[in-house]
Image: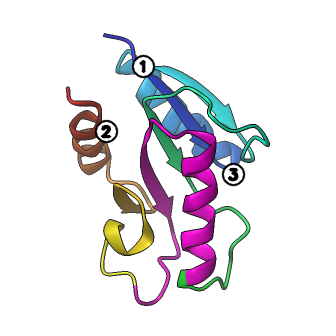
Amino acid sequence: MTRRIVLIEDDPDIAAVVDDMLTDAGHQVEVRSQLPDRTDLDAQLVITDLLALRGYDLVAARAWISRVRSAFPNAAVIVSTAHAPAGVAGAPGLGADAVLTKPIDVDTFTRTVDSLLGA
């Protein structure tokens, strides 16, 4: 079954690799470099970088995830980041369903996506 996944990533090289992995797995992928202004958009899964939040703290990271959840209220959320915020013991502390660190481990990434999509 094709699932709609939104990838929010500001690095075009990373976006291309992740897009290829998801597309090869049979998913419909929309790549965005920023979060849309609209809310209540449709997707089963959102994979997001924390974008320009370099040097951010836990409060800023949680605020970003809150904005993502407002835009995509029915989607599971994976945070993909090279800079995990201090104080985050895992996804629940951030408000996401999963947190994956870069560089992305393909097996872990695939298992996480499949798990959140109920595959």
Crowd band around label 1 with a 10 angstrom C-alpha radius: few (<14), some (14–19), many (20+): some
Question: Which residue is under mark 2?
Answer: 113
Alpha carbon distance from label 3 to label 2: 20 Å
Q: What residue sits 64% from the left and 82% below the top?
A: 56
Q: Check disc 2 and give the amino acid type.
A: Val
- The residue beneath circle 1 is 27
Q: List the residue tagged with mark 3.
A: 11
Res. 101 image quadrant: bottom left
Given the image, on which type of amino acid does mark 3 rest?
Asp
**Which numbered disc flags the more N-terminal residue, 1 or 2?**
1
Specify the farthest residue to the bottom.
Answer: 87
Tell me the crowding category of disc 2: few under 14, some 14 to 19, or many 20 or more residues within 10 angstroms, Cα based.
Answer: many
Q: Is residue 53 above or below residue 49?
A: below
Helix, strand or loop status at disc 2: helix
The mark that comes first in sequence, 3 or 2, is 3
Q: Residue furthest right?
A: 37
Q: Position of residue 36 (x, y in %)?
A: 75, 40
In three-dimensional space, the C-alpha distance between marks 3 and 1, rounded to whole angstroms, equals: 20 Å
Disc 3 is placed on an element classified as loop
Closest to the observer, 27 or 77: 77
- Percent from the top left, x then y, of residue 85? 50, 82
Quarter of the figure that contains the C terminus? top left
Q: CA distance from mark 1 to mark 2?
A: 10 Å
For marks 3 and 2, give the one nearer the viewer.
Answer: 2
Magenta stretch: give its range.
59-87
User: Is 80 included in the stretch rendered in magenta?
Assistant: yes
x, y percent for residue 112: 26, 45
Query: Of the residues shown, which amino acid type is indicated by label 1?
Result: His
* Residue at x-position 42% and y-position 65%: 95
Q: Are marks 1 and 2 in contact (CB under 8 Å)?
A: yes
Which residue is found at the position 62% from the left and 64% from the top?
64
Considering depth in this image, is 48 or 109 the residue closer to the camera? 48
